[in-house]
Structure formats: structure tokens, C-alpha cells
Amino acid sequence: MREKVSTLKNNMEQRIVGKGPVLDKVIACLLAGGHILLEDVPGVGKTSTVKALSDSLALSFSRIQCTPDTTPSDITGFSMYDQGTGKFNVIPGPVVNNIVLADELNRTSPKTQSALLEAMEEHKVTIDGTDIPVPEPFMVFATQNPAEMAGTYPIPESQMDRFMMKISVGYPDSEASEDMARRFLDGDLHGKTMPVLTGEDILEMQEEVKKVTIHDDLRSYAVRLVEETRNKSEISCGASPRAMLSMLRCAQALAYIADRDYCIPEDIAEAAALALPHRIMLSTEAKLSRTTKDDVIKQILLKVKVS
């Protein structure tokens, strides 16, 4: 299984230059059965990262380009009347695929954003009373531009809570930029990648992740980290029980890709830094003092220790 993780990452690195840690997080979220929100400025490779993953897996893929006039049925699907049979036929939407990319999700309205909620949580969509299961494995990627950019709608807290991770791709360093420029001029920057893993491989690895051991002390450590978000004055709304469960599964996946069948405290801490910041709401005082959510989680990690 470790070889399969390495094979997947190496295949993605043929397309994504100098972003090994980001790819580790993406693969960990995939193996944990979670969803990812990618937030960053345009042009740093958010969509390319998702495409590199989908092209490396023998799975179905769909991309939804979100715009202000995108409707919920553009995502979930719709029913159409068939004059020949006199019945309504259900036409599934692009969300009924293994890997779904909702590009620039915060450019569409909250009503349309919420069309992803059922699929992300229950792995099915309901169209005119008909339940349609999504294929497994199933993963939603959403990209968004920073909130201060024009033409954006904030993603509701209920939907943010369904993303296991919120990560940033970031600008490449000088060495990666040099490599990117060289490959671009040589014409091999955007080379095609072939699938290296199947859906059965991913499902098998997801089951292996669930077997990674978390000691009782580390489980209590994770619980206390989440509870601290509900008691800190800088936070007006703390992390939910779903956040805690998501963090534990994320920690198991991080241990798995590190070739361990057990978690260590660093796995829990890293999972907390990935799974908690976007799930909390800061108080007015914290916002006025320009305290960030990442800052608050770092403070909690410094305060709460493994007992």
C-alpha cells in the first residue's frame, strides 16, 4: 500500500512542480474519505492539482464552473418529461461522479452552493423524491478566491463544516519557479499523466486507514483540543463533533501515508491544524485585533498537551 501512495504522488508531481507537502495533504484527505476546500489567489495551480489527481486515478471526474447564474439543478441534476412514455426521467447532474470539482465555488449564490451539502454528507442526491447514490470512492474539491476579491459570496458555515481540510497551494519558491519556467519553455510542463490506481485500490486503502491505531491518550488529546475551541474567548463558535471525527480520521490518514499503522501526537496536531481553523468562528474582538483562525489553533496546540 505504501508503494501505491508513492506511485500516486510521483505521478502527480509530473504535473505539479514543487508542491510535495500540498500533494501529501490531498492524498491524505482522499484516503480519509474527506473533501477539500482550496483557497488561494488565481493562477497558483488549484485546479491543476485536482486535475493531476483525477488523471492519476481510473475514476470518473466532473468539473462544475461556478458562476453567479449557476443553479442547483446544474449540480444535482433534474427530471425531464418524456412525451413518449408519459413519465418523468431523472437526469443525474455532474455531482454523481467519483471526483467532483466545484471551481470558484464562492462565485455562485448560497442557494447553489448548498446543492452540494447532501452529496458531501450522505453520498447521495435527491431529485424529485428519487435518491441517486454517488459512486464510491467519492470526493468533492472546491476552489475559491480570497473573500476580499470582487464578485464572491461567503460559503455558509454549515458547508464549511463538511470540508475535512481547507488548504492553500501558495506561490512556488524560486527553485520550483525555475523548474516550472524551464519545463514550460521545453513544452513538457503540461504533459499528460496516465491513471496509476483504480477505484478498488483507493477503497482498499481507505479501509486500511480506518485500521490505523489511535491510543486512548491520543484520542483524549484530540477531544480536549476540540473542547478548547469551545472555551476560548477569541472563538464565538467552536468546532463541532463532526470536526472532531474528521480530525481523527485525518490523523489516521497522515499516519498511513507516513508508513505507520499507529498515530503519534504529531499526527493529531497536524490534523488539528488542517481540520479545525475553517470550522471555527472568531469573536468580534479577535477580528478587530487581526487575529487569524490559524493563530488561535496554534495557541490551542501550545496550551493543550498529551496527558
Image: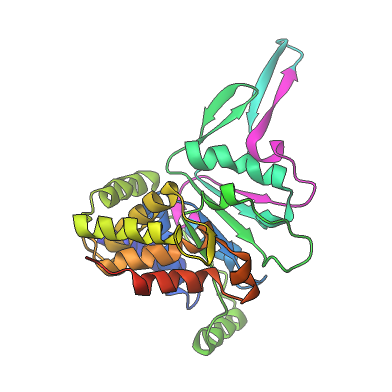
Q: Where is residue 45 shown, x and y percent of the image?
A: 59, 69
Looking at the image, residue 144 sits to the left or right of residue 239; the answer is right
Residue 87 higher or lower than 134, as above or below: above
Residue 273 higher or lower than 209, as above or below: below
The answer to if 57 sits in the magenta stretch is yes
The answer to if 169 sits in the magenta stretch is no
- State the extent of the magenta-drawn residues as a range: 54-81
Residue shown at 50% from the left, 88% from the top: 175
- Label total for image: 0
Which of these two is toward me, 112 or 176?
112
Q: Where is residue 30 shown, x and y percent of the image?
A: 42, 54
Residue 60 higher or lower than 184, as above or below: above
Residue shown at 69% from the left, 29% from the top: 78
Residue shown at 36% from the left, 75% from the top: 302
Residue 95 higher or lower than 277, as above or below: above
Looking at the image, residue 224 sits to the left or right of residue 152; the answer is left
**Residue 15, visible in the rendered structure:** no
For the N terminus, the image quarter is bottom left
Looking at the image, residue 63 sits to the left or right of residue 273; the answer is right
Which of these two is toward me, 123 or 194?
123
Q: Where is residue 280 shown, x and y percent of the image?
A: 52, 59
**Residue 304, visible in the rendered structure:** yes
Q: Where is residue 29 shown, x and y percent of the image?
A: 42, 56
Q: Quadrant of residue 171?
A: bottom right
Residue shown at 64% from the left, 42% from the top: 114
Which of these two is toward me, 186 or 243?
243
For the C terminus, the image quarter is bottom left
